[in-house]
Amino acid sequence: MSLINYSSREINCKIVYYGPGLCGKTTNLQHIYSRVPQDTRGKMISLATEMDRTLFFDFLPLELGQIRGFRTRFHLYTVPGQVYYNASRKLILKGVDGLVFVADSQIDRFEANIESLVNMHDNLAEHGLSSEKVPLVIQYNKRDLPRVVSVPDLEKELNPKGVPFYEAVALRGTGVFDTLKLTCKLVLKTLG
Amino acid sequence: MVKGNWALFEEDFYSMTLILQTLMRTANSRSVMLIDKTGQLISTVGTPPDFDVISFSSLAAADFGANAELAKMVGEKDFATLVHQGKDDSLYLSMIANRVILVVLFDKKTSLGLARLKAKRASDDLQVVLDKVFNKLQYKNEDIATTTLGADFAAEAESEIDSLFKD
């Protein structure tokens, strides 16, 4: 949940990147980290295994600047995608203001996307939240790979409510900022 | 429990900062931080830490979150306090009102016992202020942001976002 501090005139919001293992959540954050000006980003923290798989979370604070006198920050988190890290995923969703669901477009990851999306809704429900209350943007990643599911088929299965979506190739940065920009805007709309 | 956003106003923030300053002084600690349990820094007093306090806050919240789950697994309701003892610097963390985390960063100039004692007293004082804050929010929360941030906020934020996130 966003924290508005009227005394220090700060607004902090939390955005979580969710999705199955190896779908590109960390890659999204790495691209953002590499492209935003140095003075607007803090240290990127990655709690990962030696094999570079996210163990607990990645964290990247971004400073938007002053908006109507408020220093506005977004805290970007990723969750570990692997099925058995559910306790960690649940923890990270605590206080979430905006969600990005990164889906892996590859045919053989189709089921994993569905499983992860169901898991996200279950975990949100445990915090008394739902995707109706928390802004959600879907990113169909890895669109450059050869064996991918068509966007209409992904939409049909993963996006029955018709939330906004972007196609992406996070490794090259395609679609990364579109996804983030829209999510940030939707989050700030809930504040103002 | 308050749902949705929460906001801190001048008077409450000032009261909290005063409590933190007293704690820092009486416990002879290096610095004291107050962090929302979702990982957002609320206030910090004392020697400005030479590390990224924003990242520190997210890790402290995660530390507490993970330990709370461990507590449940061993049949405890929670672990209300955590201590991380290093060779030179140590951390004492405690959860207040199930909502914010008080962090005392101290070195060899003080002892864990003193930090714990003074933090306990500060926690009680902070609890009173926090109760007041949450009571206020319970009634006002629904429209607190829209009435005070102004209707133009979202529009202005959009243009800031566009200029910052140019690919």
Image: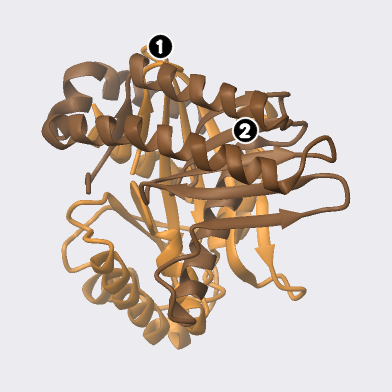
> Which quadrant of the figure has residue A109?
bottom left
| Dot 1 and dot 2 within a common chain | no
User: Dot 1: what SS?
Assistant: loop
Q: What's under tag 1, amino acid-wise?
A: Gly
What colour denotes chain B? brown
Picture residue at 49% right of the left edge, 82% below the top? B74
Specify whether B94 is left or right of B4.
right
Within-10-Å neighbours for mark 1: few <14, some 14–19, many 20+: few
User: Dot 2: what SS?
Assistant: strand
Q: Which mark is residue A69?
A: 1
Specify whether B50 is left or right of A113.
right
Q: Position of residue B33 (x, y in %)?
A: 58, 34
Q: What's under tag 2, amino acid-wise?
A: Val
The chain drawn orange is chain what? A
Q: Nearer the viewer, residue B94 or B55?
A: B94
Picture residue at 53% right of the left edge, 78% below the top? A146
Residue A9 seen in render: no
Q: Chain of mark 1?
A: A
Q: Position of residue A33 (x, y in %)?
A: 64, 43
